[in-house]
Image (tube, rainbow, N blue to C red):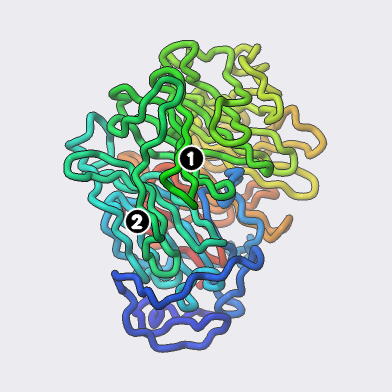
């Protein structure tokens, strides 16, 4: 049934929790958190009640980059956006959803349904900006529910290098602890001329800071390196394992200064207690948007970029067991030094823990995809750079694999979805996404199932399905000087393109490396100081 778009977007109506009744709303754009709103209850399941039987709303909580710590990019509890519904002609962009933001958006938004948002019955969309703001938006209308300022952002003109202008604020995707109803975000702040990274903890329902926060990141020395925030960039997503939030760091665009790859662990119960790992040589940054991945046992995985020497841990996949001591396993391709010299980073993509099989997928700027055994990463590879590395490796694109991959499994197949540049090894055409099929019984390889259309600058894809049924791959194309922003939907069963945003449905812009967010019958796409909403009309 049609939703009440105009009244909702105008702020005249809001939906009461658990029903479709309309209630008056007075101040949709409060910029100061309302301390009277209680903390959200802990989650009771992976699907919250919808706010109106057949309309968008509710859905599952999206508390981290790509839906989960494994970085699969898959929401397996999407009950409204079936292939038939998306291809029915009723799906499209909501022109009335136009949130007012104060800066560009580089972090993936997060989402909480009303049942766990703590915001008086509203579904919330959390958006962080380069002005060091975190906005909690009404996920149906785009109205601001609260805004939290996280300090003065760092001006591009004061940094030794970089490509984010005019300021850098919150770059990496935050993470939410649902049980504590707390959002954690790292801000780059100018404190009287000193540049400081700070961890903030915000009440998800009100935006109020938690006691003891914010806290400056100042981890102990590691591998002979002392913390220096000036040449560091925090592009990767935060990860939470238990009570610890992990924050990855690489360099700034341009690789200026003496930077290292760092992972900082913060005990959220005592945030001044910080642990750290730094790569032993200069460079070797951990900069992929997916940041730190984690498997079901709590082991951590990161991938590094180019290093300066054989011992810099450049072009490595690193595994950490308990905490951030020395890595207890690694993989690096046999052509590590060739990749280093050409700035062809293995770590342009975060590791992905493949569902059901438990193996790791890793891609990189060389266009090669690798399968790795997480229990025995294998050390230095023994192949020819593209084949014979790890459990399996092959070239997927003639150009770079960037951002993040995604994965999804049904009863018979396991799929990987990899976006890249250049010619595709498994299909005609260039760019877009290559869909790779793996048999559940065999982890030592994959074959090309199908390819998307030649999407210029394809972002990390996202998957939605209702369990094993109705799986859709969502692909956004980033805005460039030569390509317009785009959003497409593909039926995973056969690769058919079932919907394309054209004309008024096209997103106003699309930011590089930010995957679509899909939950509760809604799809969100971020751009330059913008978020677009797609749903059933």
Pinpoint residue 202: horizontal percent, then vertical percent: 41, 60
Left/right placement of residue 168 relative to residue 405 reads left
For residue 508, the mark is 2
Mark number, residue 224: none
Q: Residue at x 65, y 12 (%)?
A: 382
Badge 2 or badge 1: first in the primary sequence: 1
Q: Nearer the viewer, mark 2 or mark 1?
A: 1
Which residue appears at 50% of the width and 69% of the height?
117
| Marks 2 and 1 close (CB-CB < 8 Å) | no
For label 2, the crowd category at 10 Å Cα-Cα, with few meaning under 14, some 14 to 19 and many 20 or more, is: some
Front residue (pair 296, 371): 296
Which residue lies at the image location 39% right of the left edge and 88% below the top edge? 24
Q: Is residue 410 visible?
A: yes
Q: Looking at the picture, how far across and down is residue 193, in whole percent? A: 17, 40
Give the CA distance from mark 2 to mark 1.
37 Å
The residue lying toward the viewer, choosing from 236 and 260, is 260
Q: Where, by quadrant of the figure, is residue 327 drawn?
A: top right
Kindly identify which residue carries mark 1: 265
In this picture, is 131 found above or below 39? above
Q: Quadrant of residue 520?
A: bottom right
Q: x%, y% of residue 190?
A: 22, 44
Q: Is residue 198 left or right of residue 357?
A: left
> In this view of the protein, which residue sits in the foreground, 303 or 487?
303
Q: Quadrant of the N terminus?
A: bottom right
Local crowd size for mark 1, using a 10 Å CA cut-off: few (<14), some (14–19), many (≥20): many
Q: Secondary structure at mark 2?
A: loop
SS type, badge 1: strand
């Amino acid at each position: 049934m049609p939703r009440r778009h105009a009244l909702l977007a105008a702020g005249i109506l809001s939906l009461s929790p658990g029903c479709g009744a309309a209630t008056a709303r007075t101040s949709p754009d409060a910029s100061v958190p309302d301390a009277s709103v209680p903390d959200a209850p802990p989650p009771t399941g992976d699907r919250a009640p919808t706010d109106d039987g057949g309309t968008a709303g509710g859905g599952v909580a999206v508390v981290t980059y790509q839906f989960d710590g494994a970085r699969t990019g898959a929401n397996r509890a999407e009950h409204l956006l079936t292939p038939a519904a998306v291809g029915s002609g009723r799906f499209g962009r909501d022109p009335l959803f136009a949130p007012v933001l104060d800066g560009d958006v580089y972090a993936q938004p997060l989402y909480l349904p009303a049942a766990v948002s703590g915001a008086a019955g509203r579904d919330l969309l959390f958006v962080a900006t380069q002005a060091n703001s975190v906005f909690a938006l009404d996920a149906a209308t785009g109205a601001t529910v609260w805004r939290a300022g996280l300090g003065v952002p760092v001006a591009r003109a004061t940094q030794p290098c970089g490509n984010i202008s005019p300021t850098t604020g919150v770059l990496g995707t935050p993470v939410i602890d649902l049980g504590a109803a707390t959002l954690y975000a790292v801000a780059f702040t100018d404190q009287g001329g000193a540049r400081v990274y700070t961890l903030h903890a915000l009440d998800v329902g009100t935006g109020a800071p938690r006691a003891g926060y914010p806290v400056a990141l100042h981890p102990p020395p590691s591998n002979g390196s002392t913390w220096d925030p000036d040449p560091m960039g925090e592009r990767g997503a935060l990860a939470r394992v238990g009570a610890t939030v992990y924050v990855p760091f690489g360099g700034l665009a341009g690789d200026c200064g003496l930077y290292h790859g760092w992972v900082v662990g913060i005990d959220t119960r005592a945030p001044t207690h910080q642990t750290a790992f730094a790569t032993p040589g200069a460079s070797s940054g951990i900069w992929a948007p997916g940041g730190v991945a984690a498997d079901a046992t709590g082991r951590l995985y990161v991938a590094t970029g180019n290093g300066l020497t054989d011992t810099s841990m450049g072009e490595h996949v690193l595994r950490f067991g308990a905490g951030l001591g020395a890595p207890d396993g690694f993989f690096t391709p046999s052509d590590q030094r060739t990749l280093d010299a050409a700035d062809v980073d293995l770590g342009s993509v975060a590791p992905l823990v493949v569902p059901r099989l438990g193996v790791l997928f890793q891609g990189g700027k060389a266009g090669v995809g690798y399968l790795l055994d997480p229990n025995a990463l294998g050390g230095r590879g023994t192949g020819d750079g593209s084949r014979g590395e790890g459990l399996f490796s092959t070239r997927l694109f003639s150009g770079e694999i960037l951002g993040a991959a995604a994965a999804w499994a049904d009863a018979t197949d396991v799929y990987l979805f990899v976006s890249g540049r250049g010619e595709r090894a498994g299909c005609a055409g260039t760019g877009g996404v290559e869909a790779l099929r793996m048999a559940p019984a065999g982890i030592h390889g994959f074959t090309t199932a199908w390819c998307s259309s030649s999407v210029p600058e394809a972002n990390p894809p996202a998957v939605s399905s209702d369990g094993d049924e109705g799986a859709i791959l969502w692909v956004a194309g980033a805005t460039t000087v030569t390509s317009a922003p785009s959003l497409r939907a593909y039926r995973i069963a056969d690769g058919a393109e079932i919907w394309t945003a054209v004309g008024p449905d096209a997103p106003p812009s699309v930011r590089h490396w930010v995957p679509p967010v899909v939950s509760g019958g809604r799809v969100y796409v971020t751009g330059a100081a913008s978020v677009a909403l797609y749903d059933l009309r």
